[in-house]
Image: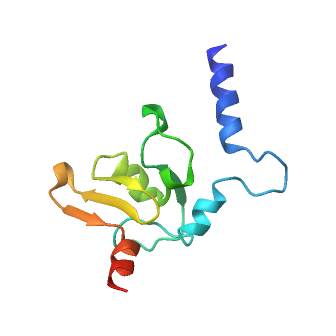
Amino acid sequence: MGLLALLEDFTSTWDAAVPGRPRRRDAVLIRDGWRCTAPGCTARNNLQEHHYAYRSRGGTDAEWNRGCLCACHHLRGEHGELASCRGRAPLEVIWTLGLGGIGGTYNNERAIAEERA
């Protein structure tokens, strides 16, 4: 029963409700310009959706809690503990780079560009 509940939750989250219609995550990819939002990265391949506040820790599926990351930054960076990000997308995301934050803390690039304008 537990496995069935897990599979049902997975399909309700990732499968399109109506065939041929875009999945809800497409809005996040469009907002983020179909590119990785990690500082200095412009990758447009192997994009994945990331929850800033993990769903396993009570985070929501709201658009402000999701961002677009390339597979490398998502799996090796965020989940590999070489980087972390927190905040509200798209303009209030704070990145901490390196193990223990040794690489520094960076604001979202769009926020920096908007502050200068």
Q: Position of residue 84 (x, y in %)?
A: 31, 52
Instruction: Specify the farthest residue to the top.
Output: 1
In this view, the residue farthest toward the right is 19
Q: Residue at x 41, y 74 (%)?
A: 110
Left/right of residue 64 with respect to residue 29 in the rendered view: left
7 and 21: which one is in front? Answer: 21
x then y, percent, for residue 39 = 34, 69
User: Where is 6 relative to 35, above or below?
Assistant: above
Pick whichever, 3 or 25, lies toward us: 25
Which quadrant, please, contains the C terminus? bottom left
Q: Nearer the viewer, residue 32 or 62?
A: 62
Residue at the spot 47% in from the left edge and 39% down from the top edge: 59
- Residue 31, image quadrant: bottom right
Q: Nearer the viewer, residue 100 or 59?
A: 59
Q: Where is residue 44? Give x, y as percent.
A: 53, 71
Residue 18 vertical placement versus 43 (above, below): above
Measuring 24% from the left and 58% from the top, which residue is drawn there? 97
Quarter assignment of residue 79: top left
From the top left corner, tell me how far across and down residue 64 is, in percent.
Answer: 50, 55
| Residue 29, picture quadrant | bottom right
**Which quadrant is the N terminus positioned in?**
top right
Number of on-image labels: 0
Which residue sits at x=62%, y=16%? Answer: 2
Please say which color scheme the image uses: rainbow
Is 94 placed left or right of 1 in the picture? left
**As drawn, which residue projects farthest toward the bottom?**
117
